[in-house]
Image (cartoon, rainbow, N blue to C red):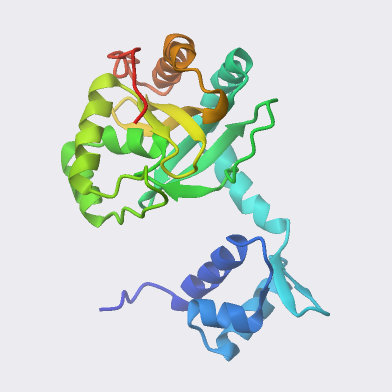
């Protein structure tokens, strides 16, 4: 049954924008039409409207469409309004200074994580992650730590709905195996990821806990496996990450002790 309050033309418009934003390659009218299963007429009307109000640009020679810088205003408005980014940013910068590794901040949205801040490294590690990127929950360190700290009923319901896509041989695709790992993550207070989505990359994450005891975001450190030193990660980086996680949690109203049960011996799964 259709929701009578939903304006379906608006839904189609945003889906079209999401489609164009999701690809580095420009789309033609016909590829957008096929991708979204829209008629050519509907696709033409939506793209024309978006061009008129400044969110799309059409290359007159190639007949292709790209988003314009105006689209950034929507994302930046969200980031500016999102208080946790403002609060976490100083701690992220300090972590980056202490470790010279990538530091990310992400939140959960619609069964995925969305990166809302990122501090780069001088090592020149290149990944396809940027502010605004979305990634799966089950094969990212932040995704797993946010799953682990959900209330039990919410976690179970979400796991039932999740599709555990396989990216490589390291990816967990069995829900019982994932659930067991989430229990361990909650007990130890942090999660780790060793190439489960992006091969050759290791990351470790902690939750940021608010006044209701909920993990509203996750913070991680990302290290290439080629120079990953297990002893250094668990004896130096992890305590620094936990400390910043506690600090930010206190600033957003949490007690700061929810992540205190840290097993520094760790292990790469």
| Residue found at the very far right of the displayed protein | 61
Q: Quadrant of residue 192?
A: top left
Quadrant in which the N terminus appears: bottom left
Q: Nearer the viewer, residue 45 or 113?
A: 113
Residue at 31% in and 53% down: 164
Residue at 56% in and 67% down: 19
**Would residue 53 be visible to someone looking at this image?**
no
Q: How far across and how far down the image is residue 79, in percent?
A: 57, 41
Q: Quadrant of residue 162?
A: bottom left
Residue at 60% in and 79% down: 31
Q: How far across and how far down the image is residue 59, in percent?
A: 79, 74
Q: Is residue 250 left or right of residue 71?
A: left
Q: How far across and how far down the image is residue 3, in percent?
A: 31, 74
Q: How far across and how far down the image is residue 259, in percent?
A: 32, 18
Residue at 57% in and 35% down: 117
**Would residue 92 be visible to someone looking at this image?**
yes
Q: Is residue 238 left or right of residue 269?
A: right
Q: Is residue 88 left or right of residue 142?
A: right
């Amino acid at each position: 049954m259709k929701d009578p309050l939903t304006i379906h033309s608006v839904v189609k418009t945003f889906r079209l924008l999401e489609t164009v934003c999701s690809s580095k390659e420009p789309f033609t009218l016909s590829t957008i039409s096929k991708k979204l299963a829209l008629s050519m007429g509907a696709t033409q009307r939506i793209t024309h409207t978006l061009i008129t109000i400044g969110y799309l640009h059409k290359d007159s020679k190639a007949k292709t469409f790209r988003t314009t810088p105006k689209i950034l205003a929507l994302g930046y408005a969200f980031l500016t309004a999102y208080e946790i980014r403002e609060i976490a940013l100083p701690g992220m910068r300090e972590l980056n200074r202490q470790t010279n590794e990538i530091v990310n901040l992400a939140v959960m949205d619609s069964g995925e994580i969305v990166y809302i801040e990122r501090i780069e490294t001088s090592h020149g590690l290149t990944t396809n992650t940027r502010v605004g990127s979305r990634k799966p929950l089950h094969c990212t360190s932040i995704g797993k730590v946010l799953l682990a700290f959900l209330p039990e009923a919410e976690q179970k319901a979400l796991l039932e709905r999740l599709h555990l896509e396989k990216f490589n041989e390291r990816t967990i695709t069995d829900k019982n195996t994932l659930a067991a790992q989430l229990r361990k993550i909650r007990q130890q207070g942090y999660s780790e990821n060793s190439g489960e989505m992006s091969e050759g990359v290791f990351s470790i994450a902690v939750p940021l806990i608010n006044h209701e005891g909920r993990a509203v975001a996750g913070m991680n450190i990302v290290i290439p496996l080629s120079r990953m030193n297990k002893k250094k990660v668990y004896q130096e980086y992890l305590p620094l990450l936990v400390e910043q996680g506690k600090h930010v949690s206190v600033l957003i109203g949490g007690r700061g002790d929810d992540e205190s049960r840290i097993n520094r011996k760790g292990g790469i799964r």
